Image (spheres, coloured by chain):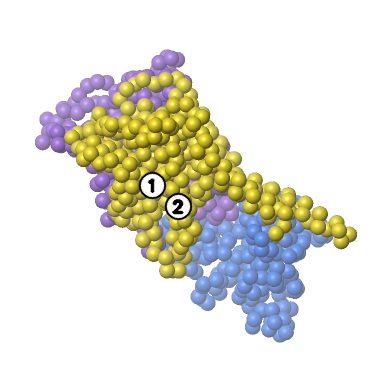
Chain colours: A blue, B purple, C yellow
Amino acid sequence: MIGASPMALLELDDVEARYGPIKALHGVSLSVEEGQAVSLLGANGAGKTTTLRAISGTVRRTGDVAFDGRRINRRPPEAVARLGISHVPEGRGIYDELTVWENVILGGSIRRDRRGVKRDAELALRHFPRIADRRKQQAGTLSGGEQQMLALARALVSRPRLLLLDEPSLGLAPTAVSELFRVVRHLNREEGLTVLVVEQNARIALTSTQHAYVLEVGRVVLDGPSEDLARHDGVRASYLGY
Amino acid sequence: MTEFFQYVVVGLANGGIYATLALALVLIHRATGIVNFAQGEMGMFCTFIAWALITHHGLPYWGAFFLTLVVAFFGGAATCKLVIQPLSRTGELTVVMATIALLIILNGLAGWIWSPEVKFLESPFPLEVVHVGGVVMNVQDLGVIGVSLLCVAIVFVFFRFTRLGLQMRASAVGPATSRLLGIRVGLMLSIGWGLAAMLSAVSGIMAASRLPFDPNFMLIVLTYAFAAAVLGGIDSPVGSVVGAFLIGIGISLLSGYASSFLGTELQLPLALAVLMLVLIVRPAGLFGQVVVRRV
Amino acid sequence: MTPFGAEKILWRMLALAAVPLLVVLLPKTLGDYYNFRFALVGIYFIAIIGLNILTGYNGQISLGHGAFLAFGAYTTAILVSNYGVGEYWTIPIAGILTGIFGFLFGLPALRLSGVYLALATFSLATSIPLIAKRYDGFAGGGQGKTIALPSSPFGALSTNEWLSYLTWAVAALMFGAAWLLLRGRVGRSFRAVRDAPIAAVSSGIGLARHKTLAFAIAAAYAGVAGALFTIANAFVNPDSFPVSLSILLLTGAVVGGLGSLEGMLFGAIFIQFAPDWGDKLSKQVHYNEASIQSTVFYGLILLGVLFVMPNGAAGLLRRGRAGLARARGRYADRSQAEPSA
């Protein structure tokens, strides 16, 4: 229920969403507290991406989505972004034709202080030395892993209060995945960034987060501390695939 | 040989007029994916406004010029917000038909408000000639070339080096992602239409300074600008400008050297036939990029 | 069959019978002037059926349909005045020749689509009248060609009444032909090409073949319309076919409803209300106030149609019928529920 946990930065209450005639979410409720890293797990088609879209306003939804105690049910994506929610979509959403630097700078679109944006763009790139010295390169020529890092760097430039990551490991080599999540862990634990990450790679998601929800066919079927889910063999076998 | 350079200069002046309009077409196509068939008429309408400001309200030339640009900007933005954006939900063809409707409306409206009789607009440049290495050039031609190049340069600088320009580029190539970054894509679109309208106004005013004009005078300019934009690659600003100058020079040379053979009637068909040949060899235009469909 | 089912069939039959009935009765009641305009509506009707097949069913935007009309018109003029061919024979001949021309145009146009095709057809539309102007002897140049005004073969009918019957008889034939064509395999594959070109190819429908076929058919229809145009006017001239004609035909097809044959009837009527654009682009600067004003209104109405009924008149009818069906459905449910309650 909205307002039940006073510290929750993000709360979803019985959220439903559909794509035309197909219902993708059948009443999802979850909450993310400030400073927490939460993972949203489940098989393909379980509704994980749709949940993130419901938060950022990219898909039409019913039910309540509250950010910082305020309902944001009717807001379009531009407005949600301006509240401080940064959604890195599935497939990264990189501007292929623009350079690395241009991509990162665009992350600061919601801010007015240009110098601050430039400074933060530099800082963000520092997390990812692999792409930092390629700023003039066209973003479409980067590898999948590098593009994901670029997307993450860009998301940081807006100084988000909540970071939504959609399947960051998709199509990435294992080394790229661990490097990426190392950065995510650092951002959450050292810099206090609140993160909600959707993943099919449950193992790495659980080691990087404190709490986890498991979705199945548009509903939450399981939730609890990440540690517990990781340790429970039965859960791992039936829900997490390992 | 001097004759050749004279034709080239005239061709460049005409090319400049096509270039500003072609740039407007490319701008719109990059942002909305359609060709705005009313682009020429928007320029025509603004030209009439400028003419009215100077002739009926006694404004000085450049005052009227810049005031018209401001009106053009808001007119273009309003068109986008009120007509284009609502209709884009229905489909591309509907939007294209809407631009055709606007073409018809503006054409009739200009004749209705200011009468369809032929009018004259002075050139802001003196009626003089300069001699450069034996070649005689009209200052007026050079003036038009200068203004056109200046506009093109301003547009390039705007998109390349300003924050707003970057956001507009981003909105054009990735509207969904841009929304997630908090960019107001709809606003970016409207601004784009406003800028395109300004470019059309410049094109029209420059064209009107060279010959007497009436409500239909921009139709042929639109045809050449359309051809230039397609020749250069419909999404390439550089390509369309280059294409426009090429077409301008080409037509000028043709009419200069082959006028007896061709007569005025065949200039346009020939130019278009050549364009078609180019397209058959390079379907995406000179600078365009082929979207591989291979079907 | 439910009572509503029978009713629906009755309505269909009435509608189908009404139109030919009107066509048969009207010319006798209209005066000379209106008969001429009525004939023109028939001519436009034929032309935009062809355009509908190309743009509505095959999904290719053509801004050059007027050029094919011009081709057909000039074919008739040249055959009649230079070679003494009987006017009525030129109707099918013009259709076939224009169809071939359309096919030939469609071949290189295969590589083009969307914006590029629009430009190509636009170029055709602007070029044809200019070429006609240039070549004096053969095509009559700027002054055009005159043919003898065909008189009515039936004493009972005046020239214009005969014209109306002739054009509408041909229109009925062409409409029927189109209807048969679109019902069959060709029609379905046309629609497939429009909606999903890649899927169409993988299912074995040759994309190339159908694109050029669509051009050929559309051109043939325009050619027939053009032939009738020359017969009606007894005169052909490059200024009768400005680019605006192609634009006008396209607006008619859109207003009628792309993808609907019957809709083209509305489209043709709509075109008739457009001011005569031929005047505007000809040398004579003899504008009149009313024509300019009606231009503005024509554009505004077109815009209005796009906002309110983007699928044209046909789409509006479809929506209306669907709405009626839903209302009737609710009524039927209720009346059926009662006895068991």
Mark 1 and mark 2 lie on one chain; the one further toward the N terminus is 2
Please report the residue visible at 28 percent of the width from the left and 31 percent of the height from the top.
C148
Point out the image quarter for the C terminus of chain B: bottom left
Residue that carries the numbered disc 2 in the rendered image: C178
Cβ atoms under marks 1 and 2 closer than 8 Å: yes
Q: Position of residue B161 (x, y in %)?
A: 43, 45
> Is label 2 in a helix, a strand or a loop?
helix
Q: Amino acid at mark 1?
A: Tyr
Kindly tell me whether residue C39 is visible in this rendering. no
Task: Locate residue B249 relative to residue A146 in the image: left or right.
Answer: left
The foreground one among A134 and C325 is C325
Q: Position of residue C332 (x, y in %)?
A: 77, 54
Please report the residue visible at 36 percent of the width from the left and 20 percent of the height from the top.
C286
Q: Chain of mark 2?
A: C
Residue that carries the numbered disc 1 in the rendered image: C221
Point out the image quarter for the N terminus of chain B: top left
The foreground one among C261 and A122 is C261
The foreground one among A87 and B12 is B12
Please report the residue visible at 45 percent of the width from the left and 31 percent of the height from the top.
C35
Residue C64, picture quadrant = top left
> Is label 1 in a helix, a strand or a loop?
helix
Taking C340 as reference, is C150 above or below it?
A: above
Q: Position of residue C239 (x, y in %)?
A: 31, 31
Residue B198, picture quadrant = top left
Marks 1 and 2 share the same chain? yes
Q: Amino acid at mark 2?
A: Ala
Disc sitting over residue C129 in the figure: none
